[in-house]
Amino acid sequence: MSADSRAPQRSNRAAQSSYRAARAVRARRRAALAAGAAAAALLLTACGSGGTSGGGGDTGFVTGTDGISTVPAGERVAAPDLSGKTLEGEQLDVGDYKGKVVVLNVWGSWCNPCRAEAKYFAKVSKEYADQDVQFVGINTRDGSTTAALAFEKDFGITYPSLYDPTGKLMLRFEKGTLNPQAIPSTLVLDREGRVAARSLTALDEERLRKMLEPVVAEK
């Protein structure tokens, strides 16, 4: 075979090799984009300003146009046992606060909506401290207490938070009460320790007060 006849074959092989390389690059780019989209969707599910109910269960919630769900007094169910170590390493049992209205806020230092609402919780918790209202945090998915304690210091959070890195406390609630993927979430317990109100989204000061005040006013 002459050199002239071999040259076109080399050219064809080079072109095919270049085409295959380009296809491989495009395939890797598509895979990377798909992975990025999946990660973004998971992040939005795990921590966003929106949320959905836990699904199933006859929990009696009635959801208002503001996204706050309430339960009539006669249909409320007791909160589960919520006890364990706080971020400071002290023992805490939410059941010890019976007789008070309890605000439970599920949060994580990694969660931007949690950071957005934290200043409102710090402010309102202090204002209601002399009205038999106790705020309690449930810190979740923080691998250590270091970042969580820094979060509390940054935002002036003075009430205790149970340390629940794996979310096991959330899973104790009756099905349909909480969605473990909706962070932040807030529950208000009445003076008998029953779930009276719920939000599966971040709260501003107005909505937090709107959620809390009717339960405080109950006799």
Image (cartoon, rainbow, N blue to C red):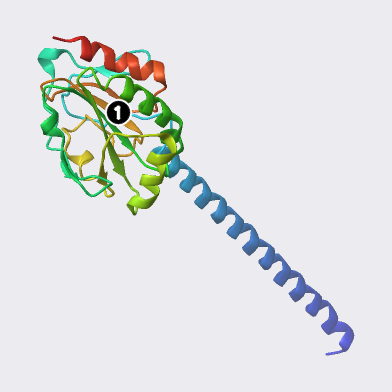
On screen, 113 above or below 169? Answer: above
At label 1, counting other C-alpha atoms closer than 10 Å, the crowd grade (few under 14, some 14-19, many 20 or more) is: many
On screen, 187 above or below 20? Answer: above
Quick check: 23 left or right of 172? Answer: right
Quick check: 169 left or right of 49? Answer: left
Q: Give the x, y percent position of residue 123.
A: 38, 24
Determine the secondary structure under disc 1.
strand
User: What amino acid is found at the position of numbered circle 1 in the picture?
Assistant: Thr
Q: Give the x, y percent position of residue 39.
A: 47, 48
Closer-to-camera residue (42/30): 42
Quick check: 29 left or right of 76? Answer: right
Image quadrant holding the C terminus, namely top left
Query: Can you see residue 100?
Result: yes
Closer-to-camera residue (76/90): 90
On screen, 117 above or below 219? Answer: below
Q: Which residue is drawn at 34% across and 35% down?
A: 182
Q: Toward which corner of the image does residue 106 lie, by quadrant? A: top left
Query: Can you see residue 67?
Result: no
Image quadrant holding the N terminus, namely bottom right
Quick check: 37 left or right of 192? Answer: right
Q: Toward which corner of the image does residue 91 lie, by quadrant? A: top left
On screen, 45 above or below 192? Answer: below
Write down the residue under mark 1: 186
Q: Toward which corner of the image does residue 212 lie, by quadrant? A: top left
Q: Residue at x 38, y 39 (%)?
A: 152
Q: Give the x, y percent position of residue 51.
A: 37, 30
Q: Give the x, y percent position of residue 49.
A: 43, 30
Q: Residue at x 27, y 13 (%)?
A: 213
Q: Which residue is drawn at 87% across and 88% down?
A: 3
